[in-house]
Image (spheres, rainbow, N blue to C red):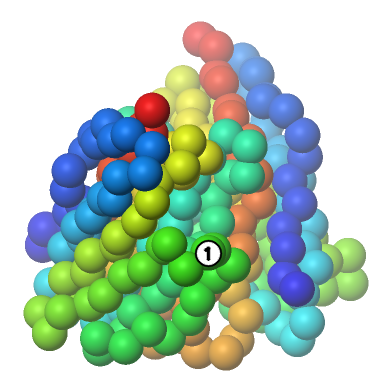
Amino acid sequence: GNSVTQMEGPVTLSEEAFLTINCTYTATGYPSLFWYVQYPGEGLQLLLKATKADDKGSNKGFEATYRKETTSFHLEKGSVQVSDSAVYFCALSDRGGNNRLAFGKGNQVVVIP
Amino acid sequence: KAGVTQTPRYLIKTRGQQVTLSCSPISGHRSVSWYQQTPGQGLQFLFEYFSETQRNKGNFPGRFSGRQFSNSRSEMNVSTLELGDSALYLCASSPGQANSPLHFGNGTRLTVT
């Protein structure tokens, strides 16, 4: 079945540092890929998405490129802020016309001033 | 436009009891999905309803059930509660088309004692 793997453990970094969160996936066919973010005490919010190979999703300074050859969708941001502290989830959906998402375990990101 | 509303925010129940959680989607959204979030298993898909019909179902026992009303509001029921059912239950709505982004509520925190 479809699955998503995110790098283990929380990520702690200083303000203005470069952020990378790795995400790889296993899926049949051609899934759509998403990054969701969960701020403390809130529900998940869509951060960005890509629906086909080589697409680049971007939002709020975050970017991720759909790499079919490496089955990856790594999230990057060039200069993080304290307000980016949150949990980030990589997810995929198949193309069956449904809204069933498979999520990674998530990564807690803590940005220190 | 109002977001996805879940009630109640917190619930404490005893083993063996049953519980009903409610979700009001964004106006105009016809799809409602439910997810269980736990520290150990992460986010797991429970089921999706579209136009009052269950369109997808995850790998949860029959104790977990749901329904959707004609106004798209949805309820989720868990019978014969177990300690392992303690989790954050998230509801998400979308227009229902393939790959349309999910809009999540803030969740209901269920604690089973």
Residue at which label 1 appears: B61
Q: Chain of mark 1?
A: B
Seen as rendered, the residue at the extreme right is A69
Q: Quadrant of the C terminus of chain B?
A: top left
Q: Quadrant of the N terminus of chain B?
A: bottom left
Q: Is residue A42 left or right of residue B4?
A: right
Q: Residues within 10 Å of mark 1 (few under 14, many from 20)?
A: few
Seen as rendered, the residue at the extreme front is B16
Q: Is residue A9 above or below residue B58?
A: above
Q: Is residue B5 above or below residue A25?
A: above
Asked which quadrant contains residue B33, the reply is bottom left
Residue at x 21% of width, y 60% of height: B23
Please provide percent x and percent y for residue A93: 59, 74
Please provide percent x and percent y for residue B11: 25, 36
Residue at x 27% of width, y 32% of height: B12
Q: Is residue A79 left or right of residue A70?
A: left
Can see residue A35? no
- Amino acid under disc 1: Pro
